Image (cartoon, grey):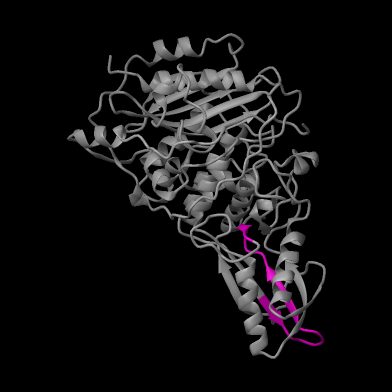
Amino acid sequence: MNGNGFNSEEQPLRSRERPRQRGRRARRRKGRLAVQLTAGIVVLGLVGYGVADAYDTVPGFLTTAPEQVIDPLPEPVAHAGSASAGKRLDADAPVPANIADRLDSALAAKGLKGKVGAEVRDAVTGDVLYSEGAQRQRTPASVTKALTAAAALGRLGAQSTFTTSAALSQSGGTPTLSLVGGGDVLLGAGASQPDQISGRAGLGTLAASTAAALKDKGVDSVRLSADLSRYAKPDFNAGWQRADIAAGYIAPIGPLMIDAARTRPVRNAPREADPAAVALDAFATALEKQGIDVAQAKPAQAAQDSQTLASVQSAPLADVLRYALLESDNVVSEVMGHEVAISMGAEPSEDGAPQAVLDALAGMKLDTGSISLKDTSGLNYGNRISPHDLAGVLRQAAAADGDLSLLVPNMPVGGLSGTLADRFRDAGSKAAAGRVSAKTGTLSTVSSLAGTVLTDDGRLLVFALMADGLPAGSAQSARAVLDRTVSSLSQCGCS
């Protein structure tokens, strides 16, 4: 492999069943606190994402991981989340008091001494129940996506969508048609598919509507270009490698792409080096099928007198973020960082987006004191987060009443979905299957896991486990330790 990370993670989910003990436990309790429970199992079971094939994929050097089998990507069903989707958390469930005994032993694995930071909090009160090296900044890998998603939910709102449009200028010469990128990088090449996330908006549908509008104006020939002015340069992060494009981990970041720039609909497929050109070609072909003569031109901002002829809308933000978190998709997460930057009045570029995400989180009253971001996906090794601040952000999300409450429910569920589909299935960790919702993070020398887990007594805990500085290629063995640690948390009692 090429690049600076580690291609590791998960296998396809093979069961659509979802455990129900969480809801039963909560309903048996008398006291209810208005804290949003990790409802990922419920949400995922309803939206048809139960067959997710996903890896927390970032490139690797000196990796010892086996060759991955490439399977078709899932086709997640769109189901816009809402803050009311979560379950109420039982405030009367016992708070575990034996966490240190369990975690000290679990984290004492060979090769991890001094390389792991951990913090566990009670989701109801926010009290720190366990802390080991939690104040030290560590490389988070793809756990970074949880911060980007939190900022996007807080700044943009769960129901917001992204518009791709066609705009016509007839100011002299051949009419100029602009395909205006609006931040939907999960476009489909064909007809819009309203029950999907990737492909919800289709360039084929946009072309049909545009052609009809052109013919109404008596226009049957256009000069076509892509308007990519929504985002600024640089479009490629200084901490990434160009080889990572062909390896399938990233693409130049712009506001116009088909299927997050994948060259074919399989996991780990190479990405396009010029995603906008591919989208423009697809749109031109679709227009020609509608009887419009097309001459393509270089990308250019639409003229001021351009009139919007047609548009298509992405899936709601909550669904887009679910896709990014479950697939651990670097491209989609980077685009969300750019959209946060726009909402903050900052430069929507690879230079401006990371700080904009931090500023957005700070504006949401979240503690970002230890956090330093170089990108918004976790592909850059320069990102730094302490387990303490990461756990703090996740606890606030678990306790939120508004759109931020959708963060944890949209994360992978242990043994069921996304990058946790084939984790929490062995004897040492299966106790937490169906009860842990968390974001994974893996680079060649990094293994992270952060989210929530429900204990045997029905108490929801927030955790952040981060191991870095590992021997290159050893992240897979480290993640097994983290899984066993979370499983141990799930079995906590009140004494």
- The residue located at (64%, 78%) in the rendering is 210
- The residue located at (37%, 23%) in the rendering is 490
Residue 255 lies left or right of residue 126; in this view the side is right
Observer-nearest residue: 199 or 405?
Answer: 199
Task: Estimate the x, y position of residue 197 in percent, counting from the top left.
Answer: 53, 55
Quadrant (top left/top right/bottom left/bottom right) for the N terminus: top right
Task: Estimate the x, y position of residue 76 in percent, counting from the top left.
Answer: 51, 50
Residue placed furthest toward the bottom = 218
Residue placed furthest toward the left = 30
Would residue 279 be seen by someone viewing this image from the given angle? yes
Residue 436 lies left or right of residue 226; in this view the side is left
Residue 394's place in the image compared with 343, above or below, is: above
- The residue located at (65%, 47%) in the rendering is 331
Would residue 228 be seen by someone viewing this image from the given angle? no
Observer-nearest residue: 140 or 356?
Answer: 140
Is residue 292 located in the magenta-colored stretch of the structure?
A: no
Residue 440 lies left or right of residue 396; in this view the side is right
Task: Estimate the x, y position of residue 112 in percent, counting from the top left.
Answer: 59, 13
Disc tally is: 0
Q: Which residues are magenta?
A: 167-188
Task: Estimate the x, y position of residue 68 in percent, counting from the top left.
Answer: 67, 31
Residue 34 lies left or right of residue 423; in this view the side is left
- The residue located at (73%, 56%) in the rendering is 275
Quadrant (top left/top right/bottom left/bottom right) for the C terminus: top left
Quarter assignment of residue 99:
top left
